[in-house]
Image (tube, rainbow, N blue to C red):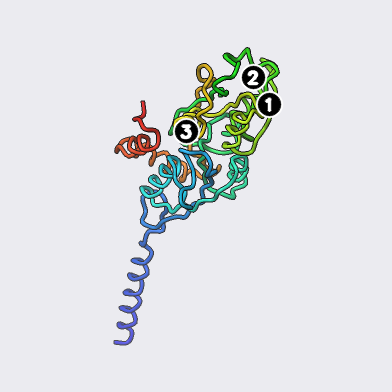
Amino acid sequence: MKKVGSIIFVFLLAIGLTACGQTSEKSGNGGTKERTVVFATEPAIAPFSFKENGQLKGFDIEIVQEIAKEKHYKVKWREMKFDGLITSLQSKQVDGGVAAITIRDDRKKVIDFTEPYYQSGLVLVTKKESAIKSLKDLKGKMIVAKQGSSGLEKANELKAKYGANVKILEDEPTLYMDVEKGRADALVNDLPFVMSKIHSGTASQLKIVGKKLTTEDYGIAIAKDEPQLLKDFNDGLAELKKNGKYDQLYEKYFGTKPK
C-alpha cells in the first residue's frame, strides 16, 4: 500500500506542477501577465506630451497607454530632453519612446518605428509684423530650431539655400519666446505645435509664413531587437483606429477628426 500511495502522490504532484506551468508567463502578446516596459518622452510638447498637475498628459501619452492596456503591458515613463530620446533607445536604457518623433531613414538605422500614427509637417513662423513674406526674405535673418529635431535639419537647409543664420535651442517653448522678444527672426517647428501655441494665445503675436515646408509622419519609437514589442504596438495601433478610440483621442487633443 505504501508503494501504491507513493505512486499516487508522485502522480498528483506531477499534475499539480503541470497545472502551475500553465500559468501564463507570456507578456504583451495577449497573455495575462503584464510586462513592464519603459517609455521615454519629453513633457514639454503639448498637445502630444505635457505635464498637468504633475501628471503626464497628451495625445502621445494616451495612445501608448491605450495600446499597453490592450496588449497587457505596464508602462513606466521616463522624462528627458528630446535630443536624448534616440540615444536612450539606441543604448537600450528605454524600450520605447514617444514625443512627436518623425520617422526618418537615419533614425530607422538605429531604432524601429511603428506604422505612422500622425501626419505632420514643418512650418516657418515669424512675428505678425515681420518683413519676412517668403523664404527668399530669409537672407541674413536668424532662424531658431530645437536641438535634435527635424526642424533643425530644415533650418540648416534654409541657411544653405537662402543665406540665413541658425541658432540651436534646447526646448520648444524657448523657440517662440526668442522670436517674440526679437532675439530671432523666425523659427521652424512642427505644424501641430505651432497651431496649438497660436490658438491657445500663448504665441498670439506669431504667424505661419506660406505653406508647409515638409510632410512628415510621427511613429512610436521602439528599441532595436524587440520584434514582439514592435508587433504588439503596431497591432494595438491598428485596433485603436478600428474601434474608434484613435478618433476620440485625436478629436480630444486637436479639436477635429482625423482626415
Q: Indicate left or right for 91 with 55 as reference.
A: right
Q: Indicate left or right for 139 with 230 as reference.
A: right
Q: Indicate left or right for 1 with 96 as reference.
A: left
| Residue drawn where x is 33% and y is 35% of the image | 247
The Cα–Cα distance between marks 3 and 1, rounded to whole angstroms, is 26 Å
Residue that protrudes farthest toward the bottom in the picture: 2
| Residue drawn where x is 52% and y is 39% of the image | 45
| Residue drawn where x is 57% and y is 14% of the image | 133
Tell me the kind of residue under disc 3: Gly
Q: Is 8 placed above or below 195 here?
A: below
Dot 3 alpha-carbon crowd within 10 angstroms: few under 14, some 14 to 19, many 20 or more? few
Res. 209 in view: yes
SS at badge 2: helix
Which mark, residue 158?
2
Total marks placed: 3
The Cα–Cα distance between marks 2 and 3, rounded to whole angstroms, is 28 Å
Q: 209 or 28, which lies in front?
A: 209
Residue 228 lies, in percent from the top left, at 46, 45
Mark 3 or mark 1, earlier in chain: 1
The Cα–Cα distance between marks 2 and 1, rounded to whole angstroms, is 9 Å
Mark 2 or mark 1, earlier in chain: 2
In this figure, which residue is indicated by the disc labeled 1? 166
Residue 249 lies, in percent from the top left, at 36, 39
Where's the C terminus, which quadrant? top left
| Residue drawn where x is 36% and y is 32% of the image | 255
Residue 156 lies, in percent from the top left, at 66, 24
Which mark, residue 252?
none
Mark 2 or mark 3, earlier in chain: 2
Residue 135 lies, in percent from the top left, at 60, 15
In this figure, which residue is indicated by the disc labeled 3? 201
Tell me the kind of residue under disc 1: Val
Res. 239 in view: no
